[in-house]
Image: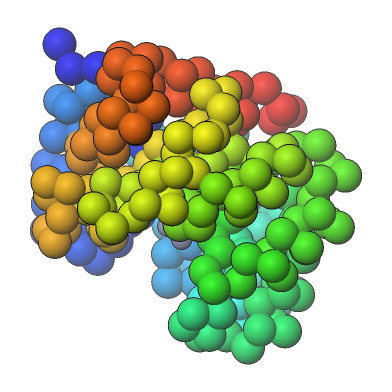
Amino acid sequence: MPVKLIDSHCHIDSEQFAEDREAVIERALAAGVEHMVAIGSGDGPPDLEAGIRLADRYPFIYATVGVHPHDASKANAETYRRLRELAAHPKVIAVGEIGLDYHYDHSPREVQRDVFIEQMRIARDARRPIVIHTRTAWADTIALLREHWTPTGLGGILHCFSEGPREAEEALAIGFHISFAGIVTFPKAAAIQEAARITPAERLLIETDAPYLAPVPKRGKRNEPAYVVETARKLAELRGVTLEEIARTTSDNWRRLCFSKCV
Ligand SMILES: [Zn+2]
Ligand SMILES: [Zn+2]
């Protein structure tokens, strides 16, 4: 019997799964993945339902809604109106992924910040946690979270955590969960691995971010939710606990974060 795991962040809507999505989902279930969170960013506005379409179809899939920082310049008043509606969907468990990406700068930074702030307001009003994407933008991300999110008390997830222990401490101090993805298994990821060691068990989550960045030993291949077990194995090794314990704590954390505050 495989251990039961939750993939807290994957892009099952991706074009990369167009040919075999059904088989990918079947393999995840066979590998013990009980629930998958289909991130709803898709290709950006006007389509905001990339995750919901999957959640409506499969009972074990949940969804998020949100405009990725890459697509921030596509957001307008109609986007926000629709996001407010969709955030109340019974299977939408969080708003995301939202945040800042200064690595690619696909949208101007100022626009990214405005869209991030507006979506924090939507999540606050919908009483949903947020899923944060941040890349080469740590200081601005944490400053905006402190100002606009911490007062809500709703918490959230730093997804695909790719910083070190100092940044992990900052995120933990403002109530965030930290979600580790395939990159924590990479041999050169010493800082991320140290962050994975110091994160308290009750704040730990796992994800694939499929189809991106598959964990060792699948590195270089298209990633898929079934591979979340490889990241769980690495976390168990780094923390000196069993795979079963990682599976149990990360699943309990996900349920507590995503289902206890929603109305
Ligand atoms: Zn991301
Ligand atoms: Zn993602």
Give the quarter of the image for residue 129: top right
Location of residue 188 in the rendering, given as x and y in whole percent from the top left corner: 28, 58
Q: How many marks?
A: 0
Q: Is residue 87 visible?
A: no
Q: Which residue extends farthest bottom?
A: 108
Eyeballing the image, is 1 above or below 20? above
Of the 4 image quadrants, the one containing the N terminus is top left
Along the line of sight, which residue is nearer the eye, 136 or 14?
A: 136
**Residue under the image location 51 percent in, 53 percent down:** 164
Along the line of sight, which residue is nearer the eye, 104 or 191?
A: 191
Location of residue 246 in the rendering, given as x and y in whole percent from the top left corner: 37, 22
Of the 4 image quadrants, the one containing the C terminus is top right
Eyeballing the image, is 22 above or below 257? below
* Image position of 240 (left or right of 263): left
Location of residue 11 in the rendering, given as x and y in whole percent from the top left corner: 35, 54
* Image position of 200 (left or right of 30): right
Q: How is the image coloured?
A: rainbow
* Image position of 176 (left or right of 135): right
Q: Is residue 6 visible?
A: yes
**Residue under the image location 14 percent in, 34 percent down:** 27
**Residue under the image location 17 percent in, 27 percent down:** 31
**Residue under the image location 61 percent in, 51 percent down:** 166
